[in-house]
Image (cartoon, grey):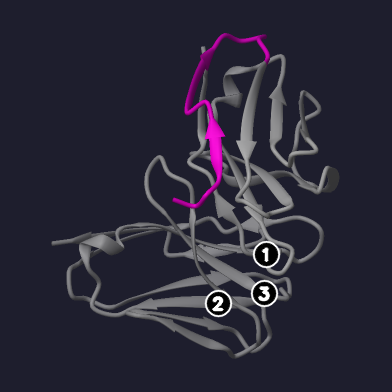
């Protein structure tokens, strides 16, 4: 069982559609990070959410931290082919670092 | 470019051998993290060093070891290699003011034959 479960595991959508990716856990996190990874490259940090209920926007990407700080979501508006990649949530509930199972997003032109 | 460098980019070796992966963190970052990424296990945390000292340990096998040197670069040593050790190995670094925000290197792809 993974500490951070992401859903869906795979997502294939048409350019211009909206989508939401979820990151869930039974543990409480002081903060959660979202990363995007392209094949063969290292993950790139997108955002950190810290406060329960916090919403952060990064252009067409909206990140939300759950009120109980156990879950987070990533919403992409009007997806573009450049959004294609593996989206990972990550957190550190204790003295280890955990990455989620990942959502592989493909945006079809 | 994250500012984190890793060498080599690719490594092919045989079972039973020993290899060393190298990482240089971003300028000014004191923390270095090592991760293993395989298709079936995802991104797994191995170990963290902070300013030369081991800070946290994850799912690191006893055959693996790491260290961080005074100039803050780090090395991950993998010994008695098995086919299952084939994976991407990433190094990441973070600053003292944002310890949870990690910047990843390009990775080393290890293939054990």
On the image, numbered disc 3 is attached to which residue? A31
Residue at 64% in and 51% down = B93
Q: Residue B100: which numbered mark, if any?
A: 1
Please report the bounds of the magenta region as a residue range.
B1-18
Q: Position of residue B18 (x, y in %)?
A: 68, 14
Seen at 55% across and 35% down, the residue is B6
Mark 2 vs mark 1: give the one in front: 1
Magenta segment, prevailing SS (helix, strand or loop): loop
Q: Are marks 2 and 1 in contact (CB under 8 Å)?
A: no
Q: Chain of mark 3?
A: A
Residue labelled with disc 2 = A72
Camera-side residue: B1 or B71?
Answer: B71
In contact (CB < 8 Å): disc 3 and disc 1? yes
Q: Quadrant of residue A82?
A: bottom left
The chain identifier of the residue carrying mark 2 reads A
Q: Quadrant of the N terminus of chain A?
A: bottom right
Which element is circle 3 on? loop
Does label 1 lie on the same chain as label 2? no
Q: Mark 2 against mark 3, which lies toward the viewer?
A: 3
Measured in 3D between alpha carbons, the distance from the residue under mark 2 to the one under mark 3, in whole angstroms, is: 10 Å
């Amino acid at each position: 069982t993974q500490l951070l479960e992401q859903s869906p595991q795979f997502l294939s959508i048409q350019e211009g559609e909206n989508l939401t990716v979820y990151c869930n856990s039974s543990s409480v996190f002081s903060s959660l990070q979202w990363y995007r990874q392209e094949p063969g490259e290292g993950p790139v940090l997108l955002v950190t959410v810290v406060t329960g209920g916090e919403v952060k926007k990064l252009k067409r990407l909206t990140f939300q931290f759950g009120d109980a700080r156990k879950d987070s979501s990533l919403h992409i508006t009007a997806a573009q082919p450049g959004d294609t990649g593996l989206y990972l949530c990550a957190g550190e509930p204790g003295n280890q670092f955990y990455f989620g199972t990942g959502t592989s997003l493909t945006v079809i032109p | 470019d994250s500012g984190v460098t890793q060498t080599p980019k690719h490594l092919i070796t045989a079972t039973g051998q020993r290899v060393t992966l190298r990482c240089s963190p971003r300028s000014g970052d004191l923390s270095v993290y090592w991760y293993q990424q395989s298709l079936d296990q995802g991104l797994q945390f191995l170990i963290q060093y902070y300013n030369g000292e081991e800070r946290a340990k994850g799912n690191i096998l006893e055959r693996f070891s790491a260290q961080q040197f005074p100039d803050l670069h780090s090395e991950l040593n993998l010994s008695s290699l098995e086919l299952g050790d084939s994976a991407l190995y990433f190094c990441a670094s973070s600053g003292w003011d944002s310890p949870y925000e990690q910047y990843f290197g390009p990775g080393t792809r290890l293939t054990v034959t």
